[in-house]
């Protein structure tokens, strides 16, 4: 967390507010958050204009007009807030010449910002990180999804959906919700999932991610959007974080461990 819908929400909000703005100064309070020499980082950022903002998987990317890009990963607790008030968890502040600012908070300090030459950005994303297809791009077809999964017949479906090299942007929360919507147990092996069931999983990936973006993401933990507001998707959650509660079918939602991660599901609805 944040996952694809949360980062996409932040991206869309920032695109309306900071594209074209010039960075006047940057304050680095926690150097380890910046994966670059701090002097080099400041030299690259100060005086540059934000010419574009994009998302790849769970990464937020600022493209600057001087040949550099800032690649941000919010990990578990990162927050990027426009005109936010800084606090003890504020580790980076970007000041713009119009008087506005962006604050970067991170309670658990797992996130980072990389300084990457624009000419090397695609290599970083497609080769070093080797992200899988974007699930909301038109190129992500059912056929492509099936072909990818068939490469891993003995893998469980839940951790496979979370593998960024398989499908980009899906994490623990949305994998649970997708599999519930598709009626598939998180422990099912790919080789045991029928074609029509695979089609349901594919459909729910697109449906649930789009719906979560519409509601500005899920504030099940520390996530807030670029306006400092909580997302509205929590009331839409069917299984994630609902261990021990009743499913709509009357069954009791369970939580198990798959590897090092948890999985929430309804044993009555999911087979």
Image: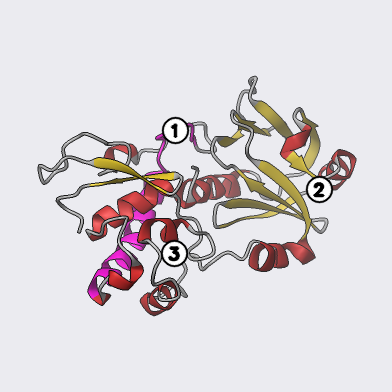
Tell me which residue sits at (53%, 67%) in the image: 132
Residue drawn 16% across and 37% down? Answer: 246
Q: SS at mark 2?
A: loop
- Numbered disc 3: secondary structure: loop
Is 144 rendered above or below residue 232?
below
Image coords of residue 70 (percent x, y): 72, 50
> In the depicted view, which residue is nearer to us: 235 or 63?
235
Q: Residues within 10 Å of mark 1 (few under 14, many from 20)?
A: few
Please identify the quarter of the rendering in which residue 13 is found.
top right
Q: Tag 3 or tag 2, which sits nearer the N-term?
A: 2
Q: Quadrant of residue 136?
A: bottom left
Q: Which residues are magenta?
A: 196-224
Query: Is residue 96 in view?
Result: no
Q: Earlier in the sequence, mark 1 or mark 3?
A: 3
Residue 236 placed where, x, y %?
A: 28, 43
Residue drawn at x 19%, y 49% is 267
Q: Earlier in the sequence, mark 2 or mark 1?
A: 2
Which mark, residue 136?
3
| Residue that lies at the very extreme toward the left in this rendered image | 250
Q: CA distance from mark 2 to mark 1?
A: 33 Å
């Amino acid at each position: 967390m944040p996952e694809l819908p949360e980062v996409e929400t932040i991206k869309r909000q920032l695109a309306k507010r900071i594209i074209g703005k010039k960075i006047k100064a940057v304050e680095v309070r926690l150097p380890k958050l910046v994966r670059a020499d701090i002097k080099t980082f400041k030299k690259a950022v100060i005086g540059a204009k934000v010419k574009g903002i994009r998302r790849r998987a769970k990464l937020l990317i600022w493209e600057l007009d001087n040949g550099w890009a800032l690649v941000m990963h919010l990990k578990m607790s990162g927050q990027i807030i426009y005109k936010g008030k800084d606090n003890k968890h504020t580790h980076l502040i970007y000041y713009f010449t119009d008087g506005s600012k962006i604050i970067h908070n991170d309670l658990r300090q797992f996130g980072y910002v990389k300084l990457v030459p624009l000419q090397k950005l695609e290599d970083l994303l497609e080769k070093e990180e080797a992200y899988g297809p974007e699930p909301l791009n038109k190129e992500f077809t059912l056929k492509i999804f099936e072909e990818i999964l068939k490469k891993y017949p003995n893998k469980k479906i839940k951790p496979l959906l979370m593998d960024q090299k398989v499908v980009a942007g899906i994490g623990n929360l949305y994998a649970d919700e997708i599999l519930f919507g598709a009626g598939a147990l998180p422990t099912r092996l790919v080789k045991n999932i029928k074609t029509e069931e695979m089609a349901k999983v594919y459909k729910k990936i697109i449906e649930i991610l789009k719906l979560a973006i519409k509601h500005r993401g899920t504030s099940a933990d520390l996530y807030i959007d670029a306006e400092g507001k909580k997302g509205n998707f929590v009331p839409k959650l069917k299984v994630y974080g609902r261990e021990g509660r009743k499913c709509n079918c009357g069954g009791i939602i369970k939580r198990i461990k798959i590897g090092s991660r948890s999985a929430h599901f309804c044993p009555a609805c999911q087979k």
